[in-house]
Image: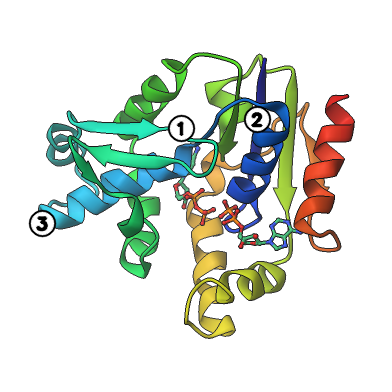
Amino acid sequence: MIVTIDGVAASGKSSVSSGVAQALGVPYVSSGLLYRAVTLLGLGAGANLADPAALLPLLSGVRLEPLASGNRVWNADHDLTADLHSTRVDTGVSVVAALPEIREWVDAQLRALPAPLVAEGRDMGTNVFPHAPHKFYLTASPHVRAERRARERPEDIPAIEAALTERDRLDTTQSAPAPDARVIDTGPLTLKGVIDTILNDLR
Ligand SMILES: Nc1ncnc2c1ncn2[C@@H]1O[C@H](COP(=O)(O)OP(=O)(O)O)[C@@H](O)[C@H]1O
Ligand SMILES: Nc1ccn([C@H]2C[C@H](O)[C@@H](COP(=O)(O)OP(=O)(O)O)O2)c(=O)n1
């Protein structure tokens, strides 16, 4: 069984997916971490982030470890995870995610993982796992999302909100909800409330 949980930036996808996956006793995968890893490695190599030919050779050692407590991304034996959520990576990642060659590489990593699993991102329900029987799409207003992110990072709320709104705009193409996804506005809910809504739907 595959459950897909897509949604806009900072809508709660990875926290919710982790909770749902732990309740189900299955792994979850954060596809955005792979786009972030490509961006981090591209920045580190001084590559043009819009040039797939410069990025693809950097990826041969990249591997996603889908731990239930939190996914990790490795480049050979180097753990990249702690560096994937910087402002620098946030700013570059949409350019990388727009490249069809990089999307193909990410999709191949994800489709190679054995089911059952919970997959989260933007296009899990539409493109990567279109036949998944259970699909969800998380939303919340930019302000609510910025307030939540501000609790994780020392930046002011208006700056985070502007950056999230810009990233939503750049990611629009791959971020449409699947027609058969249940859309959940997480704004009025607690994290547990969102997880329980999904678990109730699955039962
Ligand atoms: N009702 C809620 N639904 C989802 N996430 C919430 C909620 N309330 C607070 N959060 C918090 O919002 C933050 C952003 O969630 P995260 O899982 O990182 O989102 P995403 O994976 O979409 O970027 C987390 O710290 C999460 O705990
Ligand atoms: N399946 C996916 C997952 C992420 N992306 C892109 C779009 C996002 O700007 C980046 C980072 O995604 P991630 O889910 O880690 O970002 P947020 O946690 O929502 O801020 O990658 C994508 O295009 N397709």
11 to 142, vertically: above or below:
above
- Occupied quadrant, residue 85: bottom left
**183 to the left or right of 77:** right
| Mark 2 closeness class: few <14, some 14–19, many ≥20 residues within 10 Å | many
Crowding at dot 1, Cα within 10 Å, few <14 / some 14-19 / many 20+, comes out as: some
Residue 105 percent across, percent down from the top left: 32, 26
| Mark 3 residue crowding within 10 angstroms, few (<14) / some (14–19) / many (20+) | few
Mark 3 highlights which residue? 46
Judged from the image, the quadrant occupied by ligand 1 is bottom right
x, y percentage for residue 98? Answer: 38, 43
Residue at image mark 1 = 66
Along the line of sight, the residue nearer the viewer: 145 or 100: 145
- Badge 1 amino acid: Pro
- Amino acid carrying label 3: it is Gly
Q: Are marks 1 and 3 in contact (CB under 8 Å)?
A: no
Question: In percent of the image, x 59 and y 75: which residue is there?
Answer: 151
* Image position, residue 92 (x, y; %): 32, 58
Disc 1/disc 3 C-alpha distance (Å): 28 Å
Residue 37 seen from this side: yes
Left or right? Give the position of 13 relative to 174.
Answer: right
* Relative horizontal placement of residue 108, taking residue 130 as reference (left or right): left
| Residue lying at 66% horizontally and 26% vertically, measured from the top left | 25
